[in-house]
Amino acid sequence: MTPTRTAGAAHSVDQLLAAKEIAVSCGSGGVGKTTVAAAAAAMAAVRHGGKVLVLTVDPARRLANALGLAGIGNDEHPVPPEAFRNSGVTPRGELWAAMLDTKQSWDALVRRHAPDTATAEKILGNPLYRNISGRFVQSHDYIAMERLYELHTEGRYDLIVVDTPPTRNAIDFLEAPQRMSDFFSSRLLRWLIAPYRSRIVNFASRPFYQVADRVLGTQFLQDIAEFFILFQTMYDGFIERAQAVSRLLHDRRTTFLVVSTLEASPLNEAEFFIDALNERKLHLGAVVLNRVLPDYLLNEAATGVAERIAASAPELAETLGPEVGEPSSVERVLVEISESFLNFQVVAQREAEQRGELAVSPDVIATVPFFETDITDLSGLLRLGQHFWG
């Protein structure tokens, strides 16, 4: 069942973010969610004041370029004041930015949850850990939520806008805390380390380890076993933290911004994700539809003008005279322009219907028109942000 709009819900992204401490921007790849996240944070810093942080995990580093930062990493950095001055804006607050470094974040997690310094150093020095810690499959999802929890708990920011990782399945990061919890208590993990913990290879696993030893080598298997045995010493800390991250996502101070275009594939994924948020009772604050056609295409009076131009193109071409061009060429241009307008109008009407179908679920539906040039600076972010702000 699709939920109805809640009483007292925000009527704009402006109102929504004024009442929240965390905004999670999500959507499928290529829809502009990184840019929307940065624009929302920039607008909040300008209009609301306080300290606003945008945390991105986008490996393209477009955010750093757009904010005028030569390079940002796991540590937060303030956006230079001259970037705002160059945009002709005096912000009421401060805008900070950080980019998730998976390896650095995993190292910090190990140091936090290991039972002692010696165990932490063993894990960090394990060959397997050193080789895969920067490339843990889908670990971006969990690390992004973990980093968000850490930053929010420190209490140094009034608003944190998180750009979620690109993912084939938009709900992956929602399930990341539970997935991490399940991994530490999984039968597979216990099965992998049992022979090395007990030093007794049971009947069921003996064939696997005999073959693996011949193919991979004894040292490799020992590295794997040591890695997972050491990792299990952090079980309690990881489980507690994963549960805390899950609670934070459900907190009333957290909201989600779903970013999409109105193309079929991204829109289908956005609708699927909206349903996933509703099923998990997570707050869907806004749907931001990017690269939509302008509303003037819906003007019925303009439809009549385009139809009359197409129907009377020969007469209009003659009326405009030879100073405009050869009449047959002018006629073809007039017909082409009017037919293109009518074709775009059909697409705009379809987009309007799609927006209407989405409007029953989130607090806010906002739209951003198609920009002919890429957003590469703070001025562009603020210009984009003004379209969906309120």
Image (tube, grey):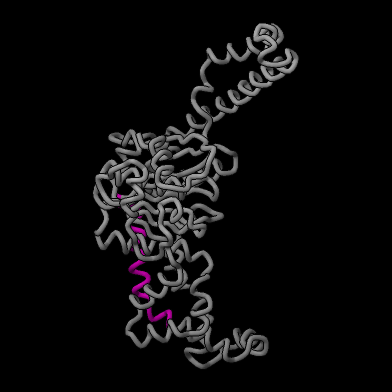
State the residue lying farthest toward the front. 323
Q: Image quadrant for the N terminus?
A: top left
Q: Is residue 343 left or right of residue 157?
A: right
- Residue visible at 43% across and 60% down? 70
Q: Residue 64 falls in which quadrant of the image? A: bottom left
Q: Is residue 291 above or below residue 67?
A: above
Q: Residue 145 falls in which quadrant of the image? A: bottom left
User: For the stretch drawn in magenta, what is the main secondary structure?
Assistant: helix
Task: Give the extent of the magenta segment.
Answer: 230-253
* Residue 288, x across and y down, in percent: 44, 39
Residue 283 visible: no
* Residue 34, x across and y down, in percent: 46, 50
- Residue visible at 36% across and 37% down? 389
Residue 76 visible: yes
In this view of the protein, which residue sits in the foreground, 37 or 378?
A: 378
In this view of the protein, which residue sits in the foreground, 387 or 378?
A: 378
State the residue lying farthest toward the right. 328
Q: Is residue 190 above or below residue 362?
A: below
Q: Is residue 135 above or below residue 319?
A: below
Q: Is residue 232 left or right of residue 217?
A: left
* Residue 120, x across and y down, in percent: 38, 83
Q: Image quadrant for the C terminus?
A: top left
Asked whether 249 falls inside the magenta stretch, the response is: yes
